[in-house]
Amino acid sequence: MNADRAIGVAGAGSIGCFVGGMLAAAGRSVALLARPRVIGEIQAGGLRLTSFEGFDQTIASSRLALSDDPSIFSEVAAVLVTVKSADTSEMADLIARHAPPDVVVVSLQNGVGNVAVLRDRLPGRRVLGGMVPFNVISMGEGRFHRSTSGDIVIEADAAGTAERLSVPGLHMRATDNIDGVQWGKLIVNLNNALNALADMPLRRQLAQRGWRRLFADQMAEGLAAIRAEGIKPVSPTPIPAGWMPPLLRLPDTIFEVLLGRTMKIDPEARSSMWEDLQRGRRTEIDYLQGVITEIADRRGLQAPLSRRIVALIRKAEADGKGSPGLTPEQIRA
């Protein structure tokens, strides 16, 4: 990857703007392909990046290439794909038409099928899987706030792409098992829908045993499905995936100590799916709980909780009123 060429961000929403902004803050040349609304916010007051750790920096719009035209990728060395899973095919076709033949494409998306889609539609180009463990909230007016901790993980390659993309404040590390890492993230991401239905900050949700028990049951259902496929998930936290359900069921005081040692969460952090419901956007439920129900159908498993959550999220999408603010008991009903 040529360090003199720009790094493109395909679909500069919350994650894309934060990652691209951190790269720009470290002196990298960055090209953001974004919606006109996001471009307007950044042009008006710069790209402001904040985090629960106290980081606060504004990158002037003049330090970024901003456009809603994919021709902005005509000379980039790498493209970081951050669009929602449903938009992967369309974005791959845009990259195929506009990016150079030697571009490195890195998927920084939720879900487990995006890399296969990108490789299918970008033959001859180097496509790497990735995993973003932290959450970013769009605060409006060009501000993007990182609200949880963790390092980005990228599939290892001979060119050392993960190391080349790593900058101060945004560490990226390589892995030889990106499939396991992505499946491990999917299991943790099953809470995205629960948080979206709860309409409360993640930390407050996880502080309540009723919500944790629901999450534990959802994780156990998901783990049973993916193990039926012969998949061994790699946890994005220091705690192995198989240990998570019993740990989530622990009393509040014990769990609070455990959480504090393994993950830092902003008191106001919420899931991206909650933000999607609030903004009237389609969610990625089909690429999270929907993956579990699809496996269950093929393997003859029940997965009733996953099916219930898919139905509740789809109803909330159809109602268009944001989060329904349900209780654990209402979700189980």
Image: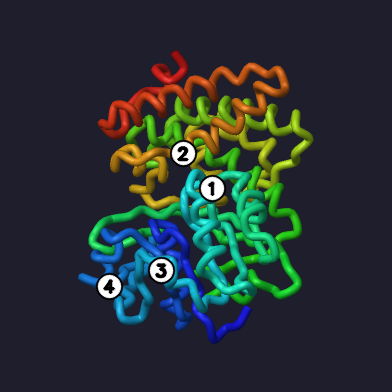
Task: Give the quadrant of the C terminus.
Answer: top left
Q: Is residue 6 left or right of residue 227?
A: left
Q: Depth-wise, is mark 2 or mark 3 nearer the camera?
A: 3
The residue most toward the right is 230
Q: Label 1's element? A: loop
Tag of residue 46: 4
Task: Give the vertical position of 315 relative to 87 (above or below).
Answer: above
Residue that numbered label 1 is attached to? 110
Residue that numbered label 3 is attached to? 32
Residue located 28% across and 64% down the image: 142
Of 4 and 266, the residue lying toward us:
4
Across and down, in percent, residue 252 comes to 48, 33
N-term mark: 4 or 3: 3
Q: Depth-wise, is mark 2 or mark 1 nearer the camera?
A: 1
Q: Label 3's element? A: strand
Q: Is residue 155 left or right of residue 83?
A: right
Real-space CA distance between mark 2 and mark 3, rounded to the nearest whole angstrom: 26 Å
N-term mark: 2 or 4: 4
Tell me whether circle 4 and circle 3 mark residues in contact (CB < 8 Å).
no
Residue that numbered label 2 is attached to? 192
Q: Amino acid at mark 1?
A: Asn
Q: Residues within 10 Å of mark 4 (few under 14, many from 20)?
A: many
Tell me whether circle 2 and circle 1 mark residues in contact (CB < 8 Å).
yes
